[in-house]
Amino acid sequence: MKMKKLLGLLAVAFVGGAMALGLNHVFFSQESKPQSFEEQQKVHFTKQSQVTDQIGGNFVGVSEKATPTVVHIKTEIQPTNQMDMGESFDPFGFFNDPRFRNNQPSQGSGSGVIIMNNGYIVTNNHVIDNASKIEVILNDKRSYDAELVGRDPETDLALLKIEETELPFLRFGNSDDLKVGEWVIAVGNPFNLTSTVTAGIVSAKGRNINLLRQNSEYAIENFIQTDAAVNPGNSGGALVNTQGELIGINTAIASQTGSYAGYSFAVPVNIAKKVLDDLRKYGEVKRAILGVRIQDITAELAAEKGIEDIEGVYIPEVVKGGAADKAGIEADDIILKIDGDKVDKSSDLQEKISQYHPGDDVTVSLRRGEKLIEKTVKLLSKDGKKEFTTETIREEKKVLGGTLENLGHAEKLDLKIRNGVRIREIGKGPLKDKGIPEGFVITMIDKQRVYTTKDVEKIIENKKGSVLIDGVLPNGDEESFAIRIEE
């Protein structure tokens, strides 16, 4: 009964209908090296005006600066052969009859924030997940088809691009500098009400709400909690400080009903900076792994382990052969600082490590028993082997006898495509049987766009029989192949 009651409190934002993808996550729970977005923003903003006019609740200046930079995102999802209700709800096969299938595309709605004047836009991954078409509507009502540059489910972030210049955009702030009690405003499109501004304060920082970790052990949660009113459709919108700087991407709300009930949560911009830069440069996130299991130190754990000072993050286990293990970190060590920055919670530690690449060196300050020690750790990738270079650590998938890899944004521009994954190697299987060459870039499967290797794996998973693959040959020519997947 306790589990049933808990499930009754969980309301997820993807509740279907016209707002299926644009809703917030809802839960109830306690070359020369390319410049980064932040570096490019500084180039354009050599002189930053002060917009702090919040006196007695007056946020006029901040709102005027932020509102033109927040866009309305509309998505379209093509129907699949699988029924929405599922066969378990159709014991008599009524809905299996093609006459009763819903073949109309579904619609979604959400928000996004322009972060460069040449059309780069950040939003939530769940806003554009599974979308076959992404439309961006600016505050001045201009509309554009958007390219999905890349997405990262583990932080629920995605990067879009529209072909436009001289756009208003929000400069990045520093979410580490936020203080509890500080005023912030949220800008978005709740319930399709465009350009809505609400205000509140930072209620807490470093919230781990176990929302993203349901789907990935590498998910990073260190949310900013505010009491600014956020509702379905605000997902991907801006959380802005009183200096008019972007300090978070609104993502989730705490609610028993699916609508705002007092608390909302945003991805800190300091997490977003590195994720967005990686998505633009490489088409995927180059995620560094420390190679330890971590645990918050509670009074109970301190008593059990004989820990005198309840500070830092406890390590119950070190991954054999991982970065921490190679640096001499041991189980029962307590991490106090990363490169001099104090960490008191697991979410703090995750955020700090998320800002590094595989191959980066970090200084880890530890307590081991009564001793204070420091270790220099060379961070590794998920597989615990590769170090970071621009040519390695691409996410790969073996599908249909081929090894597929993601593409960076620059590579897509060279091929004049907006999406696709490359066949890096061909082995025995349907791709080789059809004569598809290595280097071929798959852009669509059965008219469904593919953006990442995971998309290909997901689309192919339930395919049988003849499958149409569209794409681009290494010389840039478009080509289509009909392959057959055996029963």
Image (cartoon, grey):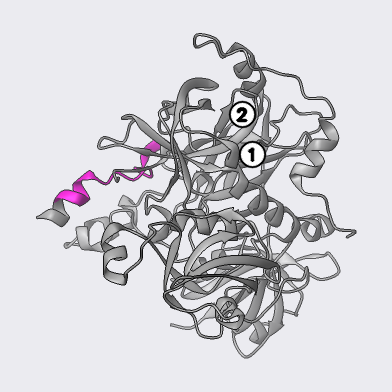
Q: In which quarter of the image is the C terminus?
A: bottom left
Q: How crowded is mark 1: few (under 14 residues within 10 Å), some or many (20 or more)?
A: some
- Residue at position x 36%, y 62% from top? 308
Q: Nearer the viewer, residue 343 or 435?
A: 343
Measured as percent of width and height from the top left, residue 152 is found at: 57, 56
Measured as percent of width and height from the top left, residue 140 is found at: 67, 20
**SS class of the residue under badge 1?**
loop
The boundaries of the magenta stretch are: 5-18
Q: Label 2 amino acid? A: Val
Measured as percent of width and height from the top left, residue 387 is found at: 70, 75
Q: Label 1 amino acid? A: Asn
Residue corresponding to mark 1? 174
Foreground mark, 1 or 2, reads: 1
Q: Nearer the viewer, residue 46 or 259?
A: 46
Residue 447 in sight from this viewpoint: no
Q: In which quarter of the image is the N terminus?
A: bottom left
- Residue at position x 52%, y 33% from top? 179
Badge number at residue 315: none
Residue corresponding to mark 2? 70
Residue 317 in sight from this viewpoint: yes
Can residue 10 be found in the magenta stretch?
Answer: yes
Q: In this view, does 45 lie above or below 362?
A: above
Mark 1 / mark 2, whichever is N-terminal: 2
Query: In the orientation shown, which residue stands out farthest toward the right?
Result: 32
Q: In this view, does 54 lie above or below 67?
A: above
Measured as percent of width and height from the top left, residue 139 is found at: 63, 22
